[in-house]
Amino acid sequence: MANSRIKVGEFNTLRVARAFDFGMYLGEDKDVVLLPKRFIPKGVEVGDMLKVFVYHDSENRLIATTQQPIGIVGDIVNLQAVSVTNQGAFMDWGLMKDLFVPKSKQLMGMRVGGYYIVKIYLDEQTGRVAATEKIEPFLNNEHLTVKELEPVDLLVYRRTDIGYTVIINNQHTGVLHFNDIFQEIGVGDRLKGYIKNIREENKIDVGIGKVGYQRVEDEAGKVLRLLQENNGYLPYNDKSDPEDIYSFFGMSKKTFKMTTGNLYKSKKIIFTQTGIKLVEE
């Protein structure tokens, strides 16, 4: 299927061309792929459009599925090894057939039950979807596709002395500093974040969540809800210990001060000597 419009290892939106007892063929003319009966949603008929993922099954046949894989070709993901052979390891990626990592694409060998960060790719020789643990060649900060304050997807890659190295949008690397972390995180976690700063030599610092007052808007609703649930008063203010604020609100003291300051200006709360109080409407 070298010239096929059907992309292996990706989601495709295809028209139902023909229906049989064992499944449906999706696509156009001879450029079709089988969707087995067990994956057909109820009520689907010939002519309907379906979004499916296309890959090779355990018998090396190209098939479509409505199951959702953890990642598609090009993604860098954290997966668990479910079996290991002399040829390589098989990872659980949410489909009936596990994802293969050849032994030559592993760093130090894989063990059953272990989690490993891998990049999903399409093998040029076989045309099948596979994965590699050798992801460094795919990460490049020379030509950046992001800018400061832009929302990004983050994957926690490794812990360092100053924080965590993160993978940004499957393409770049950045640093999430310890003093910008206000929640429990670990290697392999996926996070929503933003580009905090781009330094010399395209070194990137990132933050978690939304940037600036966009984030404060979200936190404001949390503060108001907690006030309502506690009879309109909470014993926290800008003199409170940062750990106490984080333990109760799940936010940094800086974010707490920005949020409560915004609520005060909006005349939704007042400050007291010992805390904050909800303004009665």
Image (tube, helix red, strand yellow):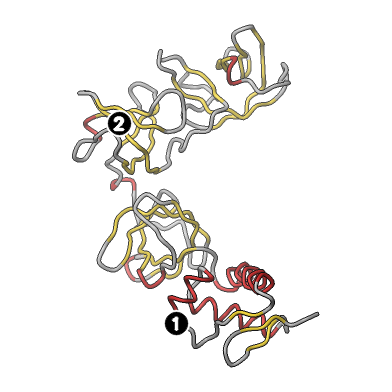
Farthest residue to the right: give it: 281
Q: Which residue is mark 2?
A: 101
Query: How far separated are the C-alphas under marks 1 and 2?
Result: 48 Å
Q: Which residue is mark 1?
A: 241
Residues 185 and 135: in front is 185
Relative to 76, say whether 183 is above or below: below
Quarter of the view holding residue 67: top right
Q: How many marks?
A: 2
Question: Residue 190: where, in percent of width, then height?
Answer: 44, 51
For the point 42% across and 33% down, the residue is: 93
Farthest residue to the top: give it: 21
Question: Residue 27: where, in percent of width, then height?
Answer: 61, 19
Farthest residue to the bottom: give it: 273
For disc 1, the neighbor class at 10 Å (few under 14, some 14 to 19, many from 20) is few
Left or right position of 134 against 74: left
Relative to 195, say whether 69 is above or below: above
Q: Secondary structure at mark 1?
A: loop
For the point 57% across and 82% down, the residue is: 235
Mark toward the viewer: 1 or 2:
1
- Mark seen at residue 41: none
Q: Secondary structure at mark 2?
A: strand
Question: Residue 150: where, in percent of width, then height?
Answer: 52, 63
Quarter of the view holding residue 215: bottom right
Instruction: Identify which amino acid the numbered label 1 is placed on.
Output: Asp
Tell which circle, 1 or 2, labels the residue nearer the N-terminal end. 2
For the point 52% across and 71% down, the residue is: 248
Asked if the residue at tag 2 contacts the one at tag 1, i.e. Cβ–Cβ closer than 8 Å, the answer is no
Instruction: Identify which amino acid the numbered label 2 is placed on.
Output: Val
Quadrant of the rendering where the C terminus is positioned: bottom right
Relative to 54, say whether 131 is above or below: below
For disc 2, the neighbor class at 10 Å (few under 14, some 14 to 19, many from 20) is many
